[in-house]
């Protein structure tokens, strides 16, 4: 069947937002390929999630439910999905592009000798041929990929690329698959939440500080309170992470995180190309910098030339009074 | 034990151009060791110093790469190996992993492969998992801390630093490990060491040496374009900071951005 198979990611027993996007786009692509949409739910005690996936438009949901599949291991999840691939024979396999999905997707593609695209932001199927669009080089190059015929394609899709599928009444069938003879070589001894975790990639608003703030104390005096007033998370440029002001966890840019929030507020950030690589696809960018020639202003939706030491406390205060925070 | 670090040379920044034949043009941009691979080299040195044996830095590329490989040797790698062949120039990630896997098999005695979590130019992070699967070895990706490499029990225990969780995982050796930025502090090679390795020529293995042929890319690039320009921005003007701040918040509210 020239259809589409979606790997279902779960968050606390619910279907992850990125998976709902993939089920929506997958339905459209499956129709264009003349096949059906299937989904695979992998884990331990995942019956309820499989039922939910069936309500989001999958014609068949494969459920691979085995105690050995939680927590995640590459060996376990690749073996489970290969069982679903054998059953569905899809031409396209979709998953998200988180670190775990990159660990999984590239391994699956290598096993299947499949075509692979990571960080896809668009997918098309015309006359049986699949094409994918992905940025590389820090967003400075937008690539369109075509794939060799006769092999499946594994596409890891960047979140917020497609609208989410809505749950419907037409529920597909759930089919259980066994995890046959898979050897799981790695042992996960603990899975701990990151202390002080900042999931910058999920934040709708990010306030980032750079060298223009002068020193570490000033960063903490000005940036987290402003982020709080916006109801957002706070980030940092590479320069101040390398200077030891702020943990790496907060770094935005080529060697840090790639973010695409609704609003990105760059404070005292000059906007080196390595920084722009990590945030240029933000929907709105506010730049605050005392140097009117700073490159950050070239990508800004709103640019404010001024001294961060003067502007940021005023901005925090203004937001607090206007937003009632 | 024998540790191999796979390193790639990349442009220092990504202000690249696109050639008419759709290849990437990084002319005029300084070439450096992929930053994440530099952390892999340092991690290799740390465990090589502890357990002895060989630390080979391996790269697929052209003669242009040799200078960066010498830098890795000056940092503390004991051996180097360059995979060089015109046939390697246009490989996609999985095909490149097949070539490197052939080299690892030819080396024969490798216990651990370290590499960066991704290259800063292609950014896919697919190389380490693909290499592991092709070799049939377990993989630990996005490692932020190696807790132990145990040659006795032939295991590695490490922390994988994902977006919101830290996993502690043990894998049997041989294994493939990809590392993230905050795993260590890569050392600067001393001038003395830089001088010492200045004339080292890495051994070169070609496609024929590796017995790889007929590598078919599963992916081809059909179009490459620069990103669409951002709509031109608006400057928030005013006689003083307080006025500008008020105006900015007005704009954010008017446009329902906040």
Image: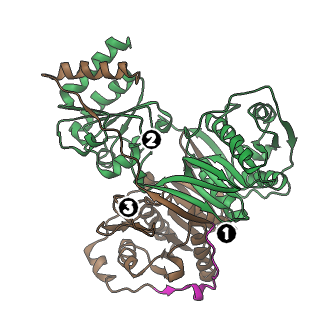
Chain colours: A green, B brown
Same subunit, labels 2 and 1: the answer reads no
Q: Residue A11 sits in which quadrant?
A: top right
- Alpha-carbon span between mark 2 and mark 3: 26 Å
The residue wearing badge 1 is B134
Same subunit, labels 2 and 3: the answer reads no
Left or right for A116, reference B13: right
A115 over A323 or under it: above or below: below
- Alpha-carbon span between mark 2 and mark 1: 32 Å
For the point 21% across and 43% down, the residue is A294
The residue positioned farthest toward the left in the image shown: B239
Left or right for A90, reference A245: right
The residue wearing badge 2 is A259
> Of residues A102 and A70, which is closer to you in this image?
A102
Q: Earlier in the sequence, mark 3 or mark 1?
A: 1
> Of residues B98 and B47, which is closer to you in this image?
B98
Q: Residue A137 sits in which quadrant?
A: bottom left
For the point 70% across and 53% down, the residue is A92
User: Pointers 3 and 1 in contact (CB under 8 A)?
Assistant: no
The percent position of residue B31, horizontal first and vertical second, equals 34, 68
Same subunit, labels 3 and 1: the answer reads yes
The residue wearing badge 3 is B186
Residue segment shown in magenta: B203-218
Quarter of the figure with the N terminus of chain B: bottom right
């Amino acid at each position: 069947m020239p259809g589409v198979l979606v790997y279902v990611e779960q968050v606390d027993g619910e279907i992850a937002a990125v998976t709902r996007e993939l089920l929506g786009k997958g339905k459209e692509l499956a129709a264009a390929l003349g096949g059906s949409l299937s989904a695979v739910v992998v884990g331990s005690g995942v019956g309820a999630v499989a039922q939910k996936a069936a309500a989001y438009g999958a014609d068949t949901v494969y459920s691979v439910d085995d105690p050995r599949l939680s927590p995640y291991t590459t060996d376990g999840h690749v073996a489970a999905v290969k069982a679903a691939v054998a059953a569905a024979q899809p031409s396209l396999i979709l998953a998200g592009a988180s670190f775990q999905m990159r660990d999984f997707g590239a391994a699956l593609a290598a096993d299947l000798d499949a075509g692979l695209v990571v960080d896809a932001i668009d997918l098309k199927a015309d006359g049986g041929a699949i094409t994918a669009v992905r940025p590389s080089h820090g967003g400075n190059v937008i690539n369109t990929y075509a794939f060799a015929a006769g092999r499946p394609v594994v596409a890891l899709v960047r979140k917020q690329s497609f609208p989410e599928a809505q749950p419907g009444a037409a529920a597909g069938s759930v089919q259980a698959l066994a995890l046959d003879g898979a050897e799981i070589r790695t042992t996960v001894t603990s899975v701990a939440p990151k202390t002080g975790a900042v999931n910058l990639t999920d934040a709708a608003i990010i306030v980032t500080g750079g060298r223009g703030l002068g020193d570490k104390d000033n960063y903490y005096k000005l940036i987290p309170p402003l982020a709080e007033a916006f109801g957002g998370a706070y980030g940092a440029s590479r320069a101040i992470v390398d200077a030891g002001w702020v943990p790496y966890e907060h770094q935005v840019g080529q060697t840090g995180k790639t973010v695409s929030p609704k609003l990105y507020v760059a404070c005292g950030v000059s906007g080196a190309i390595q920084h722009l690589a990590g945030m240029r696809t933000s929907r709105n960018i506010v730049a605050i910098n005392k140097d009117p020639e700073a490159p950050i202003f070239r990508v800004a939706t709103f640019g404010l030339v001024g001294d961060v030491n003067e502007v940021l406390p005023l901005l925090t205060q203004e937001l607090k009074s206007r937003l009632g925070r | 034990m024998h540790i191999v670090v796979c390193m790639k040379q990349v442009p220092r920044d990504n202000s690249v151009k696109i050639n008419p034949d759709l290849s990437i043009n990084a002319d005029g941009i300084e070439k450096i060791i992929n930053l994440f691979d530099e952390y892999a080299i340092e991690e290799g040195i740390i465990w090589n110093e502890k357990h002895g044996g060989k630390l080979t830095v391996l790269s697929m590329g052209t003669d242009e790469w040799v200078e960066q490989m010498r830098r890795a040797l000056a940092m503390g790698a004991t051996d180097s190996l360059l995979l060089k062949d015109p046939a390697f120039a246009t490989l996609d990630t999985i095909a490149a992993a097949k070539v490197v896997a052939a080299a690892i098999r030819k080396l024969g005695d490798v216990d651990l492969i370290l590499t960066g979590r991704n290259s800063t130019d292609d950014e896919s992070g697919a190389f380490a998992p693909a290499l592991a699967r092709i070799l049939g070895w377990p993989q630990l990706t996005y490692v932020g801390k190696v807790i132990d490499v145990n040659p006795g029990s032939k295991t590695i225990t490490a922390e994988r630093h994902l977006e919101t969780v830290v996993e502690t995982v043990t894998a049997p050796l041989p294994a493939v490990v990809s590392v993230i930025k905050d795993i260590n502090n890569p050392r600067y090679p001393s001038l003395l060491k830089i001088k010492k390795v200045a004339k080292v020529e890495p051994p070169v293995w070609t496609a024929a040496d590796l017995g790889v042929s007929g590598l078919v890319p599963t992916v081809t690039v059909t179009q490459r374009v620069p990103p669409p320009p951002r709509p031109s921005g608006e400057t928030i003007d005013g006689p003083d900071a307080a006025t500008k701040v008020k105006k900015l918040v007005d704009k954010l509210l008017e446009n329902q951005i906040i």
